[in-house]
Structure formats: structure tokens, C-alpha cells
Amino acid sequence: MEPELHPDLKPLEFLVGEWEGAGVGGYPTIESFRFGQEISFTHTGKPFLIYTSRTWLLDDEGGLARPLATETGYWRPLPDNEVEVTLAHPTGIVEIYLGNVAFSRVELRTDVVARTATAKEVTAGHRLYGLIGEDLGWAYDMAAMGQPLQSHVSAQLKRVR
């Protein structure tokens, strides 16, 4: 049985579900690429969303070539349509984002980026999530490896559940 959505999550309700699709990526330190993605926003009835994302490199025919990034975390609504997001990556990076929700759009900026000694140097991030018709579009700008904040990946996903 699906728990009832906590009232504090109403501004983020448009995100709840399972999403799949494809996107593109690039950065000055790597070659451009195409990827497939699954994103899940679920809840337990408590005032937070559980977030997971998995991506795969796509080959020239659009088939899955190999796994890429995975991230997981929690989205917690705050008063005045603000939100805080915690994300953990298996590569040794943990991020805390602060942002706001306006209608069916969320904009987030890193407040803290922490990393282990073996993680790549990531210093800042900026994320946008929003509905494009019925689809979920998102974009991630990153400052890393001595580069300033700039476009890294974006995707358009369809709700599958």
C-alpha cells in the first residue's frame, strides 16, 4: 500500500515517480557522450523524498554500453518553498544543495561539497529540474578539476510509473 504523501511535500509532488530517458554530457576534461538514465523519487509518508539516479553510457546505436554515475539522497522541503538536498556518490563525493521550488521547477546550488582523498576534485554544482510538458528535464552544471562552473550533463526523462 502506497503511503499518503506528507503535506510538506506538496510543492515537490510533481517529481514523485519513476523516470527514464536519455541525455548528453561533456566537459573540457572529457569527450562528449550520450547516456541513458533512470531517476526515482519515492517517499515513506515522512516529509522527505528518497532520490536515486543511475546512468549508462549509450553506444552509437543507442544501446547500453556500460554503467556510468550513480547517486542517491534525500530531498527535504523547507518553509517558503525552499528545499535542501543531500546527495552521496560512490566515488567519494557528498553534496548538500540548497534551493527553491517554483511551480514545477526546482533550482539548486551547492552549499557544501565534501570529498574523500581519492575522489575527483569537484568544488560546486548547480542543478535545475522541471517539467517540460509531461517530461522531466534536468541539467547539471559543475565546477571540477580546476574548471569554472559550466554545463556538464542534461537529460529529458519520461514518467514510467
Image (tube, grey):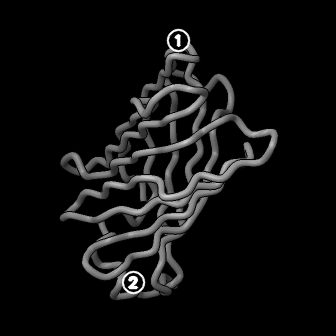
Camera-side residue of 53 and 99: 99
Camera-side residue of 121 and 19: 121
Measured as percent of width and height from the top left, residue 91 is found at 73, 43
Mark 1 Cα shell of 10 Å, populated few (<14), some (14-19), many (≥20): few
Corner quadrant of residue 24: top left
For the point 25% across and 78% down, which residue is it?
Answer: 80
Cβ atoms at labels 2 and 1 below 8 Å apart: no
Query: In the visual, does 58 lie left or right of 108?
Result: right
Res. 89 in view:
no
- Image quadrant for the C terminus? bottom left
Measured as percent of width and height from the top left, residue 141 is found at 42, 37
Res. 70 in view:
yes
Corner quadrant of residue 144: top right
Amino acid type at circle 2 is Leu
The residue to which callout 2 is attached is: 5
Q: Secondary structure at mark 2?
A: loop
Amino acid type at circle 1 is Asp
Vertical arrangement, residue 34 with respect to residue 43, above or below: above
Label at residue 152 = none
Vertical arrangement, residue 42 with respect to residue 105, above or below: below
Q: Secondary structure at mark 1?
A: loop
Mark 2 Cα shell of 10 Å, populated few (<14), some (14-19), many (≥20): some
Query: In the visual, does 99 lie left or right of 112?
Result: left
Measured as percent of width and height from the top left, residue 75 is found at 47, 68
The residue to which callout 1 is attached is: 60
For the point 39% across and 36% down, which residue is it?
Answer: 155
CA distance separating discs 2 and 1: 41 Å
Specify which label sits upstream in the sequence, 2 or 1.
2
For the point 31% across and 82% down, which residue is it?
Answer: 79
Query: In the visual, does 161 lie left or right of 50?
Result: left
For the point 28% across and 52% down, which residue is it?
Answer: 130
